[in-house]
Amino acid sequence: MNETKFDALIIGGGPNGLLAGAYLAKKGHKVALFERRHETGGGLNTDEYFGFRFNLHALYHLMAEKMPAWKDLDLANFGVRYLYPHVVAAFPFKDGSSLIFTRDVQETAASIAQFSPEDAAAYVAMWDEFQPMLDDYLIPMTYELPKPALDQLSEFNETEVGAKLAEISELSCIEVIDHYGFKHPRVRMALLSFPAIWGIHLADPLGFLYPLYLGRMMDAAFVKGGSHRLSSGIYRVFVKNGGTVIDENEVTRILVDNNRVTGVELKDGRQFKGDAVVSTLNPVQTFKQLLPKDDVPFALHQAVDNWRWEERSLFGLHLGIEGGVTYTAQDPRVNEAMTVFIGLETEDELLDHLDRVDSKTTQGPEWLHIAQPSLFDKTMAPPGHHVVRAEAVVAYDPEWRARTPAFAEDCLALIRQYASVDKIVQQRTVSPIDIEEKLTTMHRGSYKHGAYSTLQLGYLRPNDLCSCSETPIDGLFLGGASMYPGGMILGGPGYIASQVANDYLGEPAKE
C-alpha cells in the first residue's frame, strides 16, 4: 500500500475501534484502522471447533439494539441479528425450587412471590421506578459526553425522575436493595448477582449502576451465529465506506510534534500520517508505552500512574456436548433460561464468596453462571449437540495456567450437582491469563480495561483530563473501554470518540 496519509488513524480493532472507524468513514473521512492480531473484533470473539462455536469472551450483549450504532450503521442489513430468550435468568436451589426472571415483570414477580409476596410487590415497584430512570437518563447518558459529578447531580434534581435517581446514585448496590425493601435472602442474592457477575463491588457507592445492570440484564441478547457476527457487521460498514484495515501489525509509537499528533509507527517500521489518532487501548498502553514520557504532560502521567486494574476477572469453561445439559429443578423454565446461576443460596453466601475471591482464599468454583446458547441458535453446534459456557468470578493469579485443569473439573462437578451433563466431546478453558495474553488491553484479565470505582467512572474515566475523548495532546483521542462509559460491548466509547474526533476534523476534504 503506497498511501500512508489519512484523516484519522484508529489504534485497536475491537468493537470500539471498529465503531469509531465506521462512523468516521461514513462521514467521509479517510480512515485507517490498525489491529495487532490476525482478526478484528477484540472481545467479540467466536471460535469454531469441529462445528461448535464458542464465544470465548463476550456472549451477552447488554445494549444490543439500544446502542445508536444499531440504526445509524444499519447493522441489521450487515448480517447482525439479535436473539432475546424470554427467560433471562434462573436460580435453581438445592431443595428443587428456583427463582425465575423473565422479560415479563409480572411473571418475575410471581416467581419471587413463592419466597416472599412482599418482595414480589417490591420488585414491581422498583422496576416501574427504574424504567423512566433508564429511558430519560441512564441509557441516553451512555452515549453522551460525561459531566462532572456535581453538575450531573444538579441536573438530576431538576426533575422528579432525576431526583429519585440522585437519591440512590451514591448508595451501594446492597443499599439500593435495602432502599426498595427487599427482605428474603434468596431474592436479595439473585438481585445482587446481576451486578456482581460483572465485577461490581456490591458495597461500593455505585448505586446509579444498579438500574443499569438490572435493566441491561433483563434486555440482554445473544447474536445469532456468535458474538463475532456483530464485529463482522461493523467491519463491513467500515470497509464499505472506504475504511482501510491493517492487521497483524502492532502500533508501537504515536508520533507527536510540538504537542500535536502527526501519525503512528508500526512494529515493522512503517509510519502512517494522520490528522487525528483514536486509541482504544488502555491508558497505560496509550500514555506509557506508545508515547515518549516527554510528550505526555506531567499531570496526565500522574493520573495514569493511579490507574487501577480490576480485582475480579472471569474463568470460562466452554463445552461441546453430544446431547446437552438438563437441570433437575422442578420449574421447567430453568432449562429455557438465557443464563442459569448455581452454587449459592443466600445473600450472605454471595457476599462471603466474593470476600473469598478478593482475599484469594477460594478453594475452587463456588458460584457459576451458565449459558447454553445453542438452545436458541442451532447454528452454534452440530445437530444433536449443544455448546455450554460456564463462568466463575475469580481473582487474577499468575498461576492460573497450572490451576486451570483442576478448576475446570471442579466446575463440572458443581454443574453436575444441579444438572445432568451428557457426553462432552469438546472442551476449552479461558482463564484471566488467557484473557490478557489474547487481548493485551485487558491487563490482569481486566475485561473492562480497568476497575469500576468512584474514581474511575463517569467524568473520571480514565481521568478528568481524558474522559470526554479529547486528551491534552492535540489530535489524540481515546475511544476504548477505559474511557467513559466503560466496557461490556456498550458501543459507547467508540461512538463518543467518533463524534468528538469528527468535530475536530471538520468537513472532509472534497476530492
Image: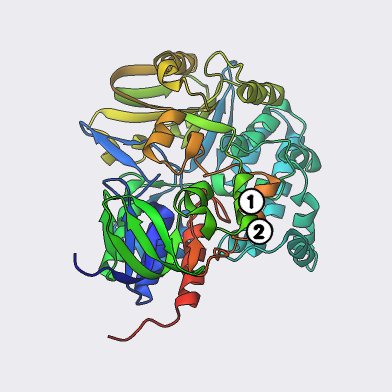
> What amino acid does circle 2 point to?
Asp
> What amino acid does circle 1 point to?
Ala
Please state if 472 lies on the left or on the right of 387 as rendered: right
Q: Quadrant of the N terminus?
A: bottom left
Tag shown at residue 464: 2
Labelled pair 2, 1 in contact (Cβ < 8 Å): yes
Please state if 72 lies on the left or on the right of 321 as rendered: right
Quadrant for residue 366, please give it.
top right
Quadrant for residue 311, please give it.
top right
Place of residue 409 in the rendered image (x, y in percent of width and height, measured from the top left): 41, 14
Q: Residues within 10 Å of mark 2 (few under 14, many from 20)?
A: some
Place of residue 509 in the rendered image (x, y in percent of width and height, measured from the top left): 35, 84
Label 2 vs label 1: CA separation?
Answer: 9 Å
Q: Quadrant of the C terminus?
A: bottom left
Residue that badge 1 annotates: 303
Residue at the far bottom in the pictured view: 510
> Which residue sits at x=27%, y=28%?
385
Whichever of labels 2 and 1 marks the residue nearer the N terminus, that label is 1
User: 407 and 255: which one is in front?
Assistant: 255
